[in-house]
Amino acid sequence: MKTLNANGEFFEPLLREVVSSIRDSLDKQNWFLFPSDPRQREQEYPLLALAHYLVAYKELEEVEGRNVSAKEVHEFMLERGEDHATCAFALLELRMGAIAKMMRCSERLGKEEGVKLFFTTLKFALRLFTITHKTEYVCLGCDLLRWYYCASPAQRKIYDNCIFTQTTSKGVSVFHDYFVELSVKDLREYTGKVYYQGLGAELEYLTATIPERDGERNDARTLRDKDATSRSSDRYGIRINEYLGKLVTKITEMKLWRAGEDPVVRGEKTSETITCSSDVITLPGGVELPSLNLSSIMDVGGKRLDRYFVRWYIDSYGAVERSE
């Protein structure tokens, strides 16, 4: 979830502009950009990514005059990124979105394979955390990486098989902390929050009979259902064809993947359009950033991460004020 929030913060102007085609208010856009539940993006973000690739495919097909392969589309988008910083910024957002998706996939894989994928994506996410100054999550991530690196084979085995994920009664793998949260909500549905005599015995009974009971709340049903959707998704509904069409129209208007033409974005006024230069990232609203920012996630982010690690675990290891 925090990876998605950091992604929404770093790429906010671009994402907000594109998402505004399907979400017509700031609150609805913020629901997508800064989710409180990772599942809030799971139905719409694939449509956004698909719209980018679909527009790039159509533009390249028009230029070539024939059907083009996925490899050719990928190379075409990379070439656009090399020629225009704004296109590279959009391409980088797609990459970070894929990393967030891979992190969610690691939850479904569970056990050893999921652990390997999770730690790989975590290393990329930590760089994004440093750029967006989320030092508390940098600290948590570094703690986990350091512990796992130093852990014995037996400790790693325990973490991989018993701590990383838990399996619901329907055989679905979920992260351990989320599983605990859902379990507590499920038990409180029946016992409440106040202690009373006999509570211990009742908790043991309720825990043992989780697979046999139907959860009355959406949170509790997640323990049993294979893939419960976000609690807000039913409210808004997902009209795939309509949403995809609007996203394709918006991205086409921005000319991000139109060969031979410079991208355009909205200016300070809604009626204004700005033509993007090749060496400057021009964001909706007329904000310009040096193209150096494109390498900041990996380069500057990596250097900051190294400095944090040295400070916390070498220079001031064990200090109580290290998180400040």
Image: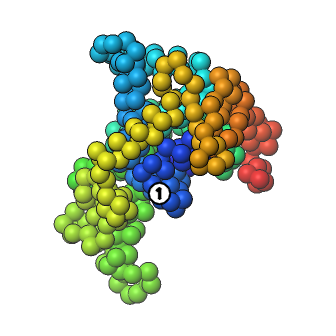
Q: Image quarter for residue 52?
A: top left
Q: Residue at x 69, y 40 (%)?
A: 287
What kind of element bears circle 1?
A: loop
Circle 1: residue type: Asp
Judging depth in this view, the residue of 44 and 119 nearest the camera is 44
Position of 250 relative to 79 (above/below) = below
- In percent of width and height, residue 286 lies at 67, 41
Dot 1 corresponds to which residue? Answer: 24
Q: How is the image coloured?
A: rainbow
- In percent of width and height, residue 139 lies at 66, 46
Identity of the residue furthest to the bottom in this view: 197
Position of 254 relative to 42 (above/below) = above
Identity of the residue furthest to the front in this view: 271
Q: Residue at x 62, y 26 (%)?
A: 85
Judging depth in this view, the residue of 43 and 221 nearest the camera is 43
Identity of the residue furthest to the left in this view: 212
255 displayed left or right of 202: right
Judging depth in this view, the residue of 54 and 167 nearest the camera is 54
228 displayed left or right of 31: left
Q: Residue at x 21, y 69 (%)?
A: 213
204 displayed left or right of 270: left
Judging depth in this view, the residue of 15 and 176 nearest the camera is 15
- In percent of width and height, residue 165 lies at 39, 47
Residue 324 appears in the rendering: yes
Residue 92 appears in the rendering: no
196 displayed left or right of 27: left
Q: Image quarter for residue 125?
A: top right
